[in-house]
Image: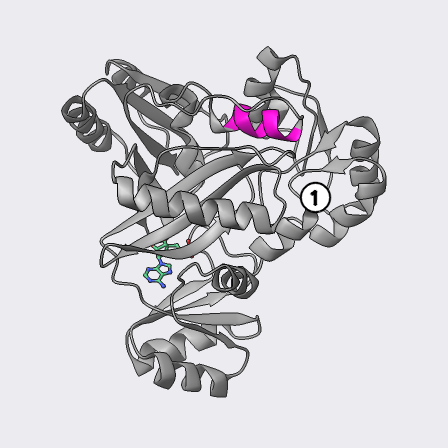
Amino acid sequence: MLALAAYPLGLQCEFLDRDAATPGGQVAPILVGELDDAQKLKQLAARVDVLTFDWENISGEALAPLRRLTRIRPSPMALRISQDRLHEKALFTKLSIPVAPHAAVDTQRQLERALSRLGLPGVLKTRRFGYDGKGQALIRSGADAQAAWARLAGEALIYEAFQPFSREVSIIGARSARGEVAYYPLAANTHQDGILRYSVAPYSNRRLEKAAAVYLRRVMRALDYVGVLAVEFFVVGGRLVANEMAPRVHNSGHWTIEGCVTSQFENHLRAICDLPLGSTRTLGAAAMINFLGTMPSRERLLDIEGLSYHDYGKAPRAGRKLGHCTILKSRVADRNRALRQVLSLVEWT
Ligand code: AMP
């Protein structure tokens, strides 16, 4: 999706990925190698004007030496903070952004202490390399705690008090090197088993959007951030509690391809290439639905008016994000009706 946004701007992309048969490889030259392969990274960095990433579980250490060869945007520092839930929460707290009560857990004794201090229910998570609900366990009882410890012990962990949220929302914005910021309206996100199923946008709540934008700007300024950044929140008692951030284009912003004047992908490219940021004005009421594990019937979906279809060309595998579709309507009621129709046709496996 980055490469597709790059072409009309006259920008050329080149990717590094572990497999030539990845979505990027279908639309741009691809260098095949491990994402922390120093030689491959060096080869890529030597050829490009700017290096970026759309997955945060890559090695900040592997990227750091490339700074001598090219610009890396966003910075490896932003990447490193976002890779560790404890560091991320420390940054949010330093910036007066509310987070769930939490404690670092490295031993069973620390888990017991965290449980008695923060109470039940809660979520035990790996601090690093977790995404889409991977490396997490919901703890409601002592027995759950035992099982969670048995499954996750051995890695640096964090225990968080469960947040009784009414909604999950995210804000996405782009910041240029000059400090110019453009942000999109909030998206309301529905997860199941820790994986995003669908997003509805704009989620119209002026007060929450204003608060989210203030928090987003604070994080961006603190990191001297360049590129697109997403911050996910729980809405608890009408207030925002930050869950995590992603230093990249984000799944909950895929709707911006059709739903806004300038997509998150284009704005990421504009930001990292020192081009003026584009308008984030919305073009209607949008919804984005992920295709997970199985592709739905293309014919039946394309029959829905105002629907755009995205097939990433990936091999099907349980829980894998294979594509998505976006609905764009002028009226919220029509969007909601089409969303229900799509949900009845999509099977998540
Ligand atoms: P994460 O990987 O932290 O984004 O977690 C994936 C999903 O699990 C979130 O989007 C929530 O739906 C749920 N979740 C994670 N942490 C908590 C928490 N502390 N309280 C309630 N739900 C949570």
Horizontal side of 24 relative to 239 (left or right) equals: right
Figure quadrant of residue 207? top left
Total tally of numbered discs in the picture: 1
Residue 141 in view in this figure: yes
Indicate the position of residue 285 as horizontal and vertical percent values. 26, 25
Q: Is residue 106 above or below residue 227?
A: below
Indicate the position of residue 273 as horizontal and vertical percent values. 67, 26
Q: Is residue 199 above or below residue 6?
A: below
Which residue does the image show at 30% across and 63% down from the upper left?
A: 163
Residue at the disc numbered 1: 35
Quarter of the picture holding the C terminus? top left
Disc 1 CB within 8 Å of nearest ligand 1 atom: no
Indicate the position of residue 219 as horizontal and vertical percent values. 53, 50
The residue closer to the viewer here, 148 or 333, is 333
> Is 66 covered by the magenta stretch?
no
The residue closer to the viewer here, 209 or 133, is 209
Q: Main secondary structure of the magenta part?
A: helix
Horizontal side of 124 relative to 349 (left or right) equals: right
Magenta segment, which residues? 265-272
- Residue type at mark 1: give it: Leu
Indicate the position of residue 66 as horizontal and vertical percent values. 81, 42
Which residue does the image show at 41% across and 43% down from the upper left?
A: 213
Horizontal side of 284 relative to 246 (left or right) equals: left
> Is 270 covered by the magenta stretch?
yes
Q: Is residue 122 above or below residue 174?
A: below
Q: Is residue 230 above or below residue 111?
A: above
Neighbor class of circle 1 (other Cα within 10 Å; few <14, some 14-19, many 20+) is some
Display coloring = one colour
The residue closer to the viewer here, 1 or 73, is 73
Which residue does the image show at 27% across and 39% down from the upper left?
A: 206
Which residue does the image show at 36% across and 48% down from the upper left?
A: 211
Q: Give ligand 1's quarter of the image.
A: bottom left
